[in-house]
Image (cartoon, rainbow, N blue to C red):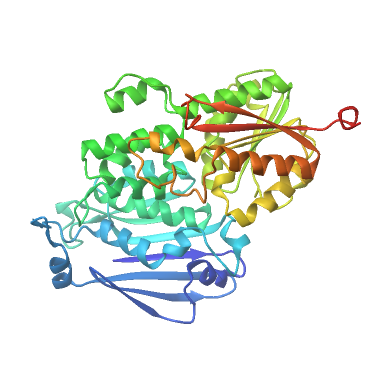
Amino acid sequence: MLMTLSTTARPATDLGYLLFKHPAKAQRFPQSSGTAHVFYPVAGEDLCTAALLLDVDPVALARNNRGREGYVNDRPYAAGSLLAVTLGSVFRTAMNGRCDERPELAAAAIPLAVRLPAVSCRGGAELAERLFAPMGWRVEARPLPLDPEFPEWGDSHHLDLRLTGELRLADALRHLYVLLPVMDNTKHYWVGEDEVAKLIRAGGDWLVAHPERELISARYLAHRRGYVRTALERLAELDDTPEEEVDEATDEPVVRPLAVVRRQAVLDALREVGARRVLDLGCGPGSLLLDLVADTSFTELVGTDVSSVALTIADRRISRLPDRARARVAVRQSSLTYTDPALAGFDAAVLMEVVEHLDPSRLAALEHVVFAGARPEHVVVTTPNIEYNPLYPTLAAGAFRHPDHRFEWTRAEFREWADGVAARNGYTARFLPVGPEDPVAGSPTQLAVFSKVTKEVAA
C-alpha cells in the first residue's frame, strides 16, 4: 500500500520538519502488519513529496490478529484500516499538530496534495467526493478496472484517488486516519470501546459539522450500534445537533445539548453588555456565528480560527444564509497566539471553549493578543468545570471532556486566572454558571464576562 504527500509551500523541504522525517533519509518502521517505509522521491525548494509504503507481512498479520477472546480475524487485508493504523503510528506527532522546530508552520494551512494510487472505496468515486470535499479537498477519483486485459469485467471497488487543498498538515492526516477505513467499510482488527475515543480524538474538530457524520461514525465503528450511538452523542455535545436528531440517534427523551445551552448563555451575555460588533475567536465550524447573525442587533460578526478546515465548513454554512444576513458575517484565518491588528476595535470578543485547547505556556500569549492587542470593550470566556466531570457516566475517571484539551480548570482555578487577567489589563471580571447546577460540583460550564474599566470607574 502506497501513499504520497506533497507540498509546494516554499521551502517545500520544511515538510520534513512537519513530519519529523528527514528528507535525506529512507526510514523503516516495524508494524504489527509488516514494515512501513518513509522516503522522499522529490525533495526540492519548490516541491517536496514524502512517500509512505506499507509492506504487509501476511504471516505476521495473521499471527498478530489471533487470540483476542478467541477472535480470529477473517479480513486480514483491510487495506484502508492497515494504512490508517500505520499513519497513526509513523506520523503520530505530526497528526497531533506538534512541530518543535517550526511551530508557526504546524499552525498554518499549506498547499497539500495526497495521492493514493490504489485505495479501496466501497461506494466508488461519488462516496470519496462526499467524504473529503466538505473539508475543503478537491477530489479526483478514477475507478480502477478489475483487470485491464478484460474491460468487460467492469470496475473494481478501488480508486486512484488524488486530493488537493490548502490545509494544516495535522488536519489532513486526521482526515485520512478516519476516512481510509470508512471508505473500505471494514477494519482488520476487533472494534472495541476505545474506538469511540479514537474517532472523537481524530475527528472531533471537523466531524461535528460533516454532512456524512452518521455514515462516517457507523463505518468507522464497524456498524456496532452501541458504539455508534455513543459517538453521535459525543459529537452532538461538541456541536449543535438539533434536538430531534439527538433523539433519533439515542432513542431517548430529548435533552437539550449543553452546546446549545452554552451558546445561548454567550448570546445573553453579549446582549446584556450591548455589543453590536463581535469577534468569535476560535469560531470552529461557525455554530455561534449562525446563532448571532439571526439577531439583527449584531451588526458585524467576524469569526477567526487557526484551522482552515473549520473555516471552510463555517464559510459553507454562512454561504447558505440570506444575502442581508451573509453581508454581516465573515470568517478569516488567525492564530490566538499571534497579534493580529485586524482584530482591534470590536465591542466584544468571545472565547467559547477555546482556552483549554492551548498549552498552559501559551495562555500568556493569548492574553496579550486578546486583552492587550485587540482590547475589545468586553470579552466573554467559557470553559469546562472539571469538578462536574464525575457526573458524566460515560466519561472515564480522570479523563478530560475532549481529547484535545490540554487542561480543565476547577472553579477556583478559573477565577484565579480570570481575576489575574482582568487586573493586569484594566478589566473587571464577573462569573456566571452555564447548565444545570449541582450543589457540590457546580455547573458543567463556567463563564466569565470581562468588561473594560472606564475612567470614571477607575477614579
Residue 101, compared with residue 413, is above or below; it is below
Q: Quadrant of residue 402?
A: top left
As drawn, is 97 to the left or to the right of 448? left
Taking the view exactly as shown, the residue that stands out farthest to the left is 70
Q: Nearer the viewer, residue 431 or 64?
A: 431
Q: Position of residue 118 (x, y in %)?
A: 29, 60
The quadrant of the picture occupied by the N terminus is bottom left
As drawn, is 13 to the left or to the right of 121? right
Q: Residue at x 59, y 48 (%)?
A: 306
Residue 29, compared with residue 9, is above or below; it is below
Whether residue 211 can be seen here: no
Whether residue 43 can be seen here: yes
Q: Position of residue 145 (x, y in %)?
A: 22, 56
Q: Position of residue 356 (x, y in %)?
A: 55, 46
The quadrant of the picture occupied by the C terminus is top right
Q: Quadrant of residue 4?
A: bottom left
Q: Residue at x 49, y 48 (%)?
A: 405
Q: Residue at x 49, y 77 (%)?
A: 23
